[in-house]
Amino acid sequence: MITRKWWQEVIVYQIYPRSFKDSDGDGIGDIPGIIDKIDYIKSLGVDVIWLSPIYKSPNDDNGYDISDYYSIMDEFGLMDDFDELLHKTHTLEMKLIMDLVVNHTSDEHFWFRESQKSKDNPYRDFYFWKKPQNGNPPNNWKSYFGGSVWEFDDRTEEYYLHLFSKKQPDLNWESPKVREEIYKIMKFWLDKGIDGFRMDVIPLISKRLGFEDSEYDNFGKTVVNYYANGPRVHEFIQEMNKEVLSKYNIMTVGEAAGVPLSMVNLYAGKDRNELNMIFQFDHVEINFGSGGRFDPQNWNLIDLKNIFNKYYEQLGDIGWPTVFLGNHDFTRIVSRLGNDGEYWEKSAKLIATFLLTMKGTVYLYQGDEIGMTNITIESPDDFNDVETINAMEDFKKRGIKDEEFMRIANQQGRDNARTPVQWCAKENAGFTEGLPWLKINPNHLHINIEDQESDNNSILNYYRKAIHLRKEMAVFTYGDYKSLNNEDPNIYIYERWDNSNKILVVLNFSSDNQRFYLREYSDLSDMELLLSNYDNISEKTHQNNLLEPWEARVYNIKY
Ligand code: ISL
């Protein structure tokens, strides 16, 4: 008998609070803003809210650099606001999970401030400190955000380790005191009644203490082999599970940066006593070249299908999948996977169909439900993201022209997903009465929630329909998956089935008409069409196997 868990069948809505809704006119989204819009969130049909970090932070990396885990970021409100949000979320029968960022802290955290003071400070070993090697950093590791992972500190004339920005020093999990402090933080929030954690870069917490030089130029390979999946990572997560997670009925999802497909079940396999599930990145990094994000490569649908096929194959019955296509670190899904010009609406709906008909726990990122797109930033001064700004420096050093950098950053940069949510066509998209912290996409004049609320045919209402359908039929969440046309570069067709239902999903990932043939289903005319992004399909195309640009269909096949 298979036991189903509540966290398997939920749909999670990710909020990036800085950009969601501002309530006090300072141009920065906040917790009262989320409370104002909680009925909207509920109306989507989602079950869980995941809040990107809301803890006190100097915002070098927009909250992923935490200076106090027990209080709320000034701009976001007070602990009372948080308590009210949690209460309202629960009253509406939704759950709330928080981001747990414990691979690193802010350099402004008390622990680091102490650690910096002297070599014999009791907090010294909360972080990694190393002597210079003939005046140079201890090894050749490159940070995720450019430059060396080692920063020299004059006070004690040693380097400290930071895999991300230099304001994000890495915690030393080897120290039992560090782990104890982290478990205390987790319990503090869980005892308030939160329903789980999304764990930031959790595969990075155990370091290879030899700190040997990476032999690769390729950043991704360096991450997998040197930074992630360290020798004690599973021991640490199992300890955390024993000490904390196992004591609560919660959900956990690990952000598995640097975990290859072959290792997914080590973190979230059902007998591992670690996490419920992880975010694996192969599909969202499909266009990353050997230099990473700012070294984009062409990608194609065949590769994407292969990634999903392998993902489900690897997980088997051992691990539980997450289904996500975007978040605050990747560009907008309709701009990346779809066509944000002529076929903006159709392709956004096709992507919704894809997201909501795949096996696993679904994660939807704010704004994607109305087809928010990437933004074109015109001036280098308008970038906000630390990763992008550091990459700009790096490009300059390598003598690459500004225009070339702007082109790549606009295509790949994280600011794309972080522009404020477009609530209406009015000034500042109804996000704030003040000056928004990040430029608002000018296309809010025609892409916004208010307009889509009143249009039955909108992307927003399509999401609602697709979410509703997913919840009505368990086959979407739990059913088996099989792709039927791996070699087709334009159309993705897959089956989903369980003991009661069989579903056929047909997705034309191209801006052209396409024809498809399936030996198994030569005649589609008898099948019940559960969902589609075109009206009156059979009249329109005259033939069932002719697809319009970005056409998506979900059929119920009678057993
Ligand atoms: O591997 C990646 C591509 O460069 C990343 O997406 C990687 O997974 C990511 O940088 C880790 O992300 C998380 O931790 C960061 C933070 O900046 C991100 O916003 C967060 O999601 C450091 O805390």
Image: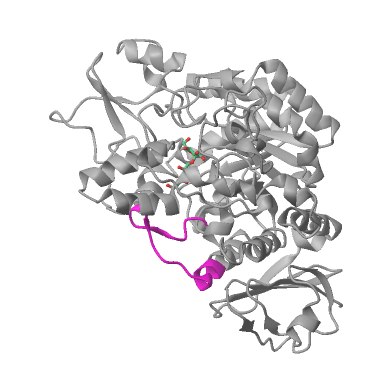
Q: Residue at x 74, y 49 (%)?
A: 451
Q: Residue at x 58, y 50 (%)?
A: 443
Count the labels in the image: 0
* Residue 192: % across, % down: 73, 21
* Residue 489: % across, % down: 53, 77
> Foreground residue, 78 or 480?
78
Does residue 96 lie above or below 533 as drawn? above
The verdict on residue 287 being magenta is yes
Range of residues picked out in magenta: 284-306
Does residue 275 lie above or below 81 as drawn? below
Does residue 374 show up? Answer: yes
In this rendering, position of residue 124 left or right of residue 237: left
The verdict on residue 371 being magenta is no
Does residue 13 lie above or below 133 as drawn? below
* Res 151 → quadrant: top left
Q: Which quarter shows the C terminus?
A: bottom right
> Foreground residue, 281 or 537?
537
* Residue 209: % across, % down: 34, 34
In this rendering, position of residue 61 left or right of residue 381: right
Does residue 143 show up? Answer: no
* Residue 62: % across, % down: 50, 31
In this rendering, position of residue 172 left or right of residue 157: right
